[in-house]
Amino acid sequence: MTEALDPEMRRHPALRAARRLVVGVVGGTVLLAGLALLVLPGPAVVVIPLGLAILATEFVWARRWLESARERIAWSEPATEAEPPAGERVAAPVMAGARGGEDAFLRATGAPQRA
């Protein structure tokens, strides 16, 4: 895949091997870190696919795993905030109570209670 894009890699097998080694080490490290994040606090669901994506640039098995994972994940539409139609009232809970002592805000506004 990358050899078709870069003719220099085709001419020098040592460069191709070095690239595969670097991609394998970096992608493998990211993938292992993602697997560790399954039990440690952290974004494993982000890091594991990232490691597979890095490895998929050079290794067919990683590309297959990544494609399989994409097929299994059911992507849903992003959640949007529902806005009430214009002019309609919306019920919202408000917690209010009386405070002991004098409250300067209540005195200034004349409100019976403060939320």
Image: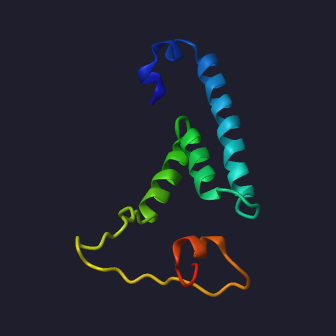
Position above or below: 93 against 9: below
Position above or below: 77 against 24: below
Tell me: 87 left or right of 77: left
Q: Nearer the viewer, residue 111 or 21?
A: 111
Image position, residue 11 (x, y; %): 52, 12
Which image quadrant is residue 20 in? top right
Residue at 23% x, 70% y is 86
Image position, residue 74 (x, y; %): 41, 66
Q: Nearer the viewer, residue 92 or 102?
A: 102
Tell me: 33 left or right of 82: right
Tell me: 89 left or right of 42: left
The quarter of the image holding the C terminus is bottom right
Image position, residue 26 (x, y; %): 68, 36
As drawn, the residue found furthest toward the left would be 86
Q: Nearer the viewer, residue 60 or 30?
A: 30
Position above or below: 53 against 73: above
The quarter of the image holding the N terminus is top left
Q: How are the colours assigned in the image?
A: rainbow
Residue at 67% x, 76% y is 103
Residue at 62% x, 50% y is 47
Residue at 59% x, 58% y is 45
Position above or below: 7 against 92: above
Q: Nearer the viewer, residue 92 or 4?
A: 92
Which image quadrant is residue 43 in? bottom right
Disc tally is: 0
